Image (tube, rainbow, N blue to C red):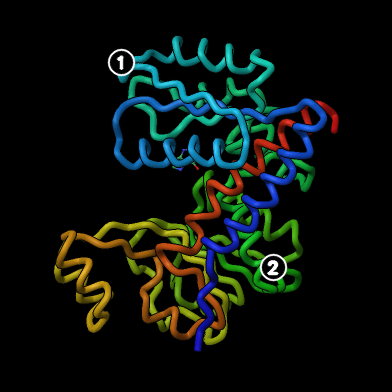
Amino acid sequence: MARALDGAAIAAAIKAEVAEEVKRLAARGVRPGLAAVLVGHIPASEMYVRSKVQTCGELGLYSDLIAPPETVTTEEMMDLVASLNDRDEIDGILVQLPLPKQVDTKALLDRVSPAKDVDGFHPVNAGKLQAGRPALAPCTPEGIIEILDRSGIAIEGQRAVVVGRSDIVGKPVAMLLLNRHATVTICHSKTRDLGAVTREADILVAAIGRAGLITPEMVKPGATIVDVGINRITEQADFDRFFAGNAKRTESFAKRGSTIVGDVHPRAYELAGAYTPVPGGVGPLTIAMLMSNTVRAAKMRRGL
Ligand code: GUN
């Protein structure tokens, strides 16, 4: 029977550790602070940012939510980020993506001080990660490593296959796994005979953003599956393909008209030794690691 890895429980443990560290820093007169920048009214972005700010409060971090108008220009955003770089009570700067199309996202992310880049998106931090040097790394990839470590799943010497090459998940998680001495292969939409590669994986990370792309015959029995996908499905045919016979899902799909599926077909989980479910696997770690990175940035900036 495949073991479901409980991301919510692991995230709660990390958050408790961060709260302890925040208390220790308070005794030294330091309060880590996060600035969250949210532009526009994308429901998912609003939900994530609200949750990030709320978690800061729960763990004792200072937070500042800044919501420029949807018509904001690149120049105005550059000025905003520059002012956050200069504010001493701000240790981490989070610019929620995606931004409106008139804003030059790359130029803006380059403007964030690498020392306050708690998302790990700045090229300086990407370069340090690549060079195996201490750096602020993207939160979801860091969370994946935490799940593996805290679940007792070895990384060193294992064959890891990452499906997806995004700057936010695929590339950085591949680097983190490589730095931990896994043998890493990165696959993507142009990879020939994807299944032949994924079947080699002891650790299979699916982060390509395609509902149920990884099917049972693409998985080596006993492998660890890390499913990073969050895909909303609304069509009955899709639902039947993934969840036929699942009473709980059938009920919630009937009620809401939609449900969430990962990049891995749920029947493929059954072959795994361990897997991260969707929802409740990797997702909860992202905010926990953002908090952890903010505290880390606060300490690094003060030489602690
Ligand atoms: N949008 C989707 N994921 C992320 C993330 O990890 N960080 C930021 N800033 N925006 C996102």
Quadrant in the rendering for residue 194: bottom left
- Total number of numbered labels? 2
Left/right placement of residue 220 relative to residue 266 reads: right
For the residues labelled 1 and 2, say whether their Cβ atoms are less than 8 Å apart: no
Please state which of the two labelled residues, at mark 1 or mark 2, is closer to the viewer. 1
Q: Is the residue at mark 2 in contact range of ligand 1, meaning its CB lies under 8 Å from it?
A: no
Q: Is residue 15 left or right of residue 244?
A: right
User: Mark on residue 71?
Assistant: 1
Furthest toward the bottom, the residue is 1
Quadrant for the C terminus, please: top right
Tag 1's secondary structure?
Answer: loop
Left or right, residue 66 beside residue 249: right
10 Å crowding of disc 2: few (<14), some (14-19), many (20+): some
Q: Is residue 297 visible?
A: yes
Q: Residues within 10 Å of mark 1 (few under 14, many from 20)?
A: few
For residue 183, the mark is 2
In terms of image quadrants, where is residue 137? Answer: top right
Q: Position of residue 55 (x, y in %)?
A: 53, 41
Residue at left 80%, top 32%?
27
For label 2, the SS is strand
Residue 64 image offset from top left, x and y in percent: 52, 24
Residue 199, compared with residue 112, is above or below; it is below
Q: Residue furthest right?
A: 303
**What residue appears at the point 45 percent right and 63 percent down from the top-left corner?**
280
Question: Along the line of sight, which residue is nearer the eye, 208 or 87?
Answer: 87
The amino acid sitting under disc 1 is Thr
Going by the numbered disc 2, the residue's amino acid type is Thr
Q: Position of residue 215 (x, y in %)?
A: 38, 77
* Residue 189 visible in the current orientation: no
Q: In the displayed structure, would residue 67 be above or below residue 202?
A: above
Q: Looking at the rendering, which quadrant does residue 160 occupy?
A: bottom right
Q: Position of residue 95 (x, y in %)?
A: 49, 29
